[in-house]
């Protein structure tokens, strides 16, 4: 993605810059799926300071020590980190002691360690030496910052020091990803987001000037396409035996589901509880999110699970079942006969998360404040996919609606009925109903929204950050 701006990462970039600007030495751990932009973000943040970049090689532990010695010698440029004993590479203690000695007086030094998980794979005893070096830097009032970058949070434990930071990058939100997606309208780009998701490494391959169909056929449905096997390759990279994980993702590909959805959807999981370890690992690597109802007890065992990135859900929903035929030139027919007609329900399955992201990050444009709590509500008699509290103190309850459909005309009645079944937000001075429509709302809905001061209609332009928005007409 070249030197293009870090769209959607403003908050994370600021967080890292503040961490690297502290006078106290710190350990920063940054995790996220491959391709999500971890390295680029950390290096961009570190570029404002004196910094060193080191990528851990997939080699034995002794070779990893030698590689770090070379990095320090080549990039520090002062000769104090280049020592290599006659008996072999320097020890971890020697390396990190030399790193502390290389910190310039009065300004921070940032060491970015990419692929830090390879230290763990080689069973390198890095942690004690690194912790001792940071403690030494603190005692000397030196601003040494070590940023460990890997798919999961590295095994090197974060310090109890207040300057320690753990940061996990998620796929881009729809609004941030929209700049890379094809489509003449926000609605079309929302459909493209449901297909290609929010991983920058994937979005970089999309041609925003071509149609969605052309991109899907070129990147995914061509057997040699750049993204044809990307989700499966990711599972094979993350797990030694990916088949069960693939089955779990297939069970969730049609949309959010419960533990029972997964348990019943994986054919060889018969005993109770067998799905749990697979779901937990998929959560740990950032592929799946576990959610609980906002009005549930923090200790509840009732969760819903969703695939975080829409592209992964799209691939397991539409591509995997026909993957064995892709080399036989069926891409055009698969797009025309299966994928294109199946996109509306797929878009509907990812729309609630798009709306929740909007409430968390962009609702201030419409409501005057963003949400301080974002989630969903479900229980006996109610299932409200978007709900929470605004920073203003108001409670809100949201429902995605297909504009102009029969559901459009009854949406408010259905939402009101469900709100009466939950105690969440009860007693709040203001309780808002928010309808997220994917197009021009029906006249009855427009009239009802104009009549009531507790109803706001949010159109696709507002979700996508365009100038036009139905909200300006119907907010009272």
Image: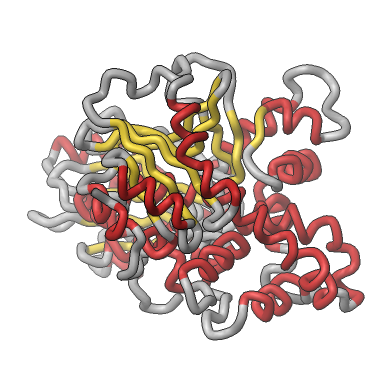
State whether residue 248 is above or below residue 33. above
Tell me: 329 left or right of 442. right
- Residue 133 sits in quarter: top left
* Quadrant of the rendering where the N terminus is positioned: bottom left
Q: Is residue 89 visible?
A: no
Asked whether residue 33 is in view, the answer is: yes
Of the pair 428 and 277, the residue shown nearer to us: 428
Closer to the camera in the image, 438 or 49: 438
Relative placement, left or right, of 18 versus 360 is left
Location of residue 219 in the rendering, given as x and y in whole percent from the top left corner: 68, 74
**What colour scheme governs how the chains and residues are painted in the rendered image of this protein?**
secondary structure
Residue 44 versus residue 362: which sits nearer the camera? Answer: 362
Residue 439, percent from left and from top: 49, 62
Question: As displayed, is residue 466 above or below residue 120?
Answer: below
Q: Residue at x 85, y 23 (%)?
A: 270
Nearer to us in this view, 274 or 54: 274
Q: Is residue 287 above or below residue 419?
A: below
Residue 91 in picture, x, y percent from top left: 43, 45
Spot the residue most to the bottom: 209
Q: For the point 48% across and 35% down, which residue is it?
A: 413
Task: Find residue 235 and report its horizontal and vertical position in percent.
Answer: 70, 50
């Amino acid at each position: 993605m070249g030197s293009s701006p870090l769209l959607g990462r403003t908050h994370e970039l600021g967080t890292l810059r503040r961490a690297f600007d502290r006078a106290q030495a710190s350990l920063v751990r940054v995790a996220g799926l491959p391709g999500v932009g971890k390295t680029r973000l950390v290096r961009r943040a570190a570029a404002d300071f004196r910094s060193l970049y080191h990528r851990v090689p997939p080699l034995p532990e002794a070779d990893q020590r030698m590689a770090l010695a070379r990095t320090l010698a080549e990039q520090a440029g002062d000769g104090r980190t280049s020592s290599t004993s006659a008996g072999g590479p320097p020890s971890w203690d020697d390396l990190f002691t030399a790193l502390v000695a290389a910190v310039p007086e009065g300004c921070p030094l940032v060491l970015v360690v990419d692929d830090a998980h390879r230290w763990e794979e080689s069973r390198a005893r890095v942690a004690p030496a690194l912790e001792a070096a940071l403690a030494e830097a603190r005692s000397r009032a030196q601003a040494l910052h070590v940023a460990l970058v890997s798919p999961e949070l590295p095994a090197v434990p974060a310090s109890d020091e207040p300057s320690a930071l753990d940061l996990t990058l998620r796929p881009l939100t729809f609004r941030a990803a929209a700049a890379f997606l094809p489509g003449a309208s926000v609605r079309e780009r929302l459909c493209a987001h449901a297909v290609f998701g929010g991983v920058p490494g994937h979005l970089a391959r999309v041609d925003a000037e071509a149609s969605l169909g052309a991109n899907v056929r070129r990147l995914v449905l061509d057997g040699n396409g750049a993204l044809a096997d990307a989700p499966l390759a990711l599972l094979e990279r993350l797990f030694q035996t990916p088949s069960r994980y693939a089955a779990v993702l297939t069970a969730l590909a049609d949309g959010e589901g419960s533990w029972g959805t997964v348990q019943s959807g994986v054919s060889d999981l018969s005993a109770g509880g067998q799905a749990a370890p697979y779901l937990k690992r998929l959560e740990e690597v950032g592929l799946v999110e576990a959610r609980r109802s906002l009005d549930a007890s923090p200790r509840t065992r009732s969760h819903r699970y969703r695939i975080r990135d829409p592209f992964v859900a799209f691939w397991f929903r539409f591509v995997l079942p026909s993957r064995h035929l892709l080399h036989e030139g069926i891409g055009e027919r698969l797009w025309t006969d299966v994928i294109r007609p199946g996109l509306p329900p797929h878009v509907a399955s990812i729309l609630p998360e798009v709306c929740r992201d909007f409430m968390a990050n962009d609702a201030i444009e419409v409501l005057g404040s963003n949400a301080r709590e974002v989630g969903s509500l479900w229980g006996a008699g109610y299932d409200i996919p978007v709900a929470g509290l605004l920073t203003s103190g108001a409670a809100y309850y949201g429902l995605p609606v297909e504009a102009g459909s029969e559901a459009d005309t009854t949406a408010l009645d259905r939402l009101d009925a469900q709100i009466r079944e939950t105690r969440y937000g009860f007693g709040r001075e203001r309780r808002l109903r928010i309808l997220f429509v994917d197009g021009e709302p029906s006249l009855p809905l427009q009239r009802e929204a104009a009549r009531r001061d507790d109803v706001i209609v949010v159109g696709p332009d507002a979700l996508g950050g365009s100038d036009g928005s139905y909200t300006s007409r119907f907010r009272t």
